[in-house]
Amino acid sequence: MPLLNMSEAARAAGVSRGQLYRLVESGRISATKRPNGQQGIDTAELLRVFGALQGTGQADRMNSSRPSGAGQLVQQETVRRVSELEAEVRRLTDVLRLTERMLQTAEDRLRQADAERAQLMLLLPMPTSRQLDHQPVTPAAAPAPQKTVRRVAAKKAKVAEPVRPAPARKTAAAKTASRKTPARKTRSA
């Protein structure tokens, strides 16, 4: 809000300048130094101490077509601030509506996901009480190749896996005998 000099502040508050100075000295109202070095009083301070100011109230606005200099400043500042606040309220109302719609959409999606999960749970087979008592619930693993399973089972039982006999190797004589070589013809003399 605008900073008024002591004369303007006294006029707006409807008190004498002397009384305003005494209120500042007693600390009941605060004053600040203006850029030109004089004391000034913010209109918010005047409103806090005196309530409605002269020339700024609804009745004064209706009865007076031309408010005084200080009253006109206060009135202009008040109108500008009210307009800003109304625009902010409209913007925040729009944001609130958008947020409520987003929340409603999220809640609808959550309810739908819960319903789908419940339907999927009904499709799962129910474990027996024996399975619940003796086996921990773990995710199913991919089946291992059969040879690996046999080897693991054999290791667990500490039994050697049966060894298949290797095919017999042929001796050198057997290899030669098995070759099909044409028989040599001998010459008879």
Image: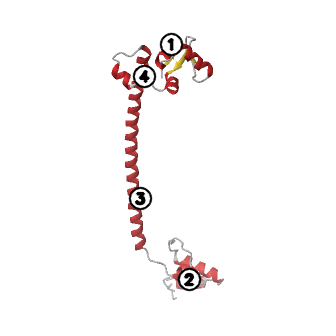
- x, y percent for residue 103: 41, 51
Q: Do the residues labelled 4 and 2 touch (CB within 8 Å)?
A: no
Q: Name the residue under label 3.
A: 110
- x, y percent for residue 115: 39, 65
- The amino acid marked with disc number 3 is Leu
The nearer-to-camera label among 4 and 3 is 4
The nearer-to-camera label among 4 and 2 is 4
Residue sitting nearer the eye, 23 or 126? 23
Residue sitting nearer the eye, 129 or 166? 129
Asked whether, in this view, residue 51 is left or right of residue 156, the answer is: left
Specify which label sits upstream in the sequence, 2 or 3.
3
Give how far apart the Cα atoms at labels 1 and 3 are.
65 Å
Residue occupying image coordinates x 44% and y 77%: 125
Specify which label sits upstream in the sequence, 4 or 2.
4
The nearer-to-camera label among 4 and 1 is 1
Q: Name the residue under label 2.
A: 176
Residue occupying image coordinates x 53% and y 80%: 131
Specify which label sits upstream in the sequence, 4 or 3.
4
Q: Mark 4 points at which residue?
A: 77
Q: Mark 1 points at which residue?
A: 7
Specify which label sits upstream in the sequence, 4 or 1.
1
